[in-house]
Image: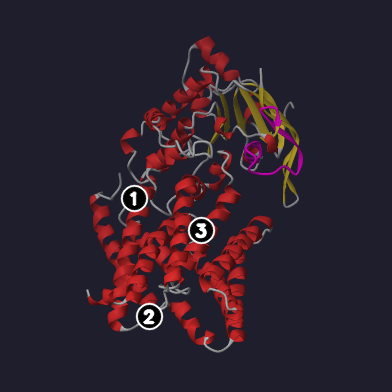
Amino acid sequence: MSLFQYDFMQRAFVAALIVGIISPLIGVFLVQRRLALLGDGMGHVALTGVGLAFLVGSAPIPTALVVAALGAVILEVIRARSRTAGDLALALVFYGGIAGGVFLTTLAGGKATTSLNQYLFGSLSTVSASDLIGLGVAAAVVIVVLAVFGRELFAMSLDSELAQVQGIRTTLMSTLLTVMAAISVVVGMRTVGLLLVSAIMIVPIAAAQQLTRSFTVTAMIGVALGLISTVAGLTSSYYLDVPPGPTIVLIALAIFVLAGLAGFGIRRRGRLIGR
Amino acid sequence: MTTIFSLTEGCVDYDGNHALHDVDLTINRGEFVAVLGDNGSGKTTLMRALLTLTPLDHGYLTIDSLPEARFREWNDIAYVPQRLLSAGAVPVSVAEVVATTSISSRTRFQWWSRSRKAAVRTALEQVGLWERRNDRLDTLSGGQQRRVLIASALAKGATVFILDEPTAGVDAENQELIAETFRMIRDQGGTVILVTHELGTFTDLATRVVILDHGRVSYDGPAPGPKRAHDHGVHHSEDLRPSEPPSTLFGTAGGDV
């Protein structure tokens, strides 16, 4: 394919593959906990990190990682320590995140305001070689955490009280999951963009669960659909000359609609996919 | 006899109302305790307090003779809730739910071992749902889902069971199956704490009955059921409703404390 002759496209594809794998793996836990919008909020918070990076001239990905992870911890503390309802705590952190991001970016002035768009909706040309290293490390961290704590995260997501009675430290697990969501948001911010990155965590899972009957299989099919969405979305973005975020998300949504129709037929025949 | 739970002057307030008021309760290993009471009597709050899910506003709880905050052997205590808190969000198979209870920080790297698989199978067979192991939990009836949760508790390999209305919505035949399972657990020296508004099939199993009324213990004593069951050899639940003193056992007015 001709689009692979460009280095920037090769890098964009590697980044998209990482996003397609990581995001649904975190998303499946968020959907189970009914926190589908958490990724959105983490995207807003990461924007403050990007703004901060513009202002002080640091690298955007590590700065956004640190700020989003801090935001995740603050969110969990607000939720655990106060009687604030979960969604209200989310709202408070989100507003602060987006306001801070735009404020800091504007203060930085110059090129920063124009490149803000690339962070909001993704861009084909901005993934640098050093970005790829950052994304790879962040993705590796997510995979290792899931390998070690995935089962405890599953138990906590299924029933936090039952998990607590098993001696699982549910507050710790909940914080870990939110920090993982923050990391995967930053991983997706270059290709999908901060405003849409949460969709690639949630929509492939929403599509997969139309077809499946177990959590593990839902996660695996979610990853497959996530990969199809990011790769197809990136390709069409190249040919249509539009930002990749919207094409990736529209393709994921189209897959969701198809899966919904297929699931309807499958359920009527009682042949959902599982082990 | 070793004590598993000891609650001293336990108080829990919800918005200024006493859900539990000065409750003293000691439960020993090997007991089969039925905690009875009407809706709002505080029986669920008492159960949650024992599980440390609801913090005490006043009072002191020890588990296995340790202050609750220092108790670590949660693998030994199995809790059967009425339903899962977030079931139905993502499809979850019956086998996945049953295997969940064997997840802990200690078994982090050996969770899906052969013995765990065998425990899941045995537990599902005990509740008669092994054939449904690969089905989505939310395609099962309410009563079947409850049996899945009981299987989860059994698969945990615990010796102490806390059951919240385990037979509500379960048909008569499977109530017998569940009761038989817990009879076996009792006979093997296990501890069962059953929170319910009616004893039903458990009538001849309970060795002790605790009745709560408006957050206070209104009766704590032996269950007449087992004696009668053994004396007369009858097993029909209608016959086994504790008859002495019936007004105290099943009435709402306060009786002996």
Label disc, if present, on residue A197 of the rendered structure: none
Residue at the location (49% across, 44% down)? Answer: B83
Amino acid on which disc 1 is placed: Val
Q: Which residue is mark 2?
A: A243
Under circle 3, the secondary element is helix
* Numbered disc in front, either 3 or 1: 3
Q: Which residue is mark 1?
A: A217
Under circle 2, the secondary element is loop
Q: Which residue is mark 3?
A: A180
Whether discs 2 and 3 lie on one chain: the answer is yes
Pick the residue in front: A274 or B70.
B70
Residue at the location (50% across, 35% down)? Answer: B166
Residue at the location (46% across, 34% down)? Answer: B150
Pick the residue in front: A81 or A113.
A113
Q: Quadrant of residue A87?
A: bottom right
Q: What's drawn in magenta, residue-wise?
A: B45-66
- CB under 8 Å between discs 3 and 1: no
Give how far across and how far down residue B17 sits, in percent. Answer: 74, 48
Colouring scheme applied when the structure was drawn: secondary structure
* Numbered disc in front, either 2 or 1: 2
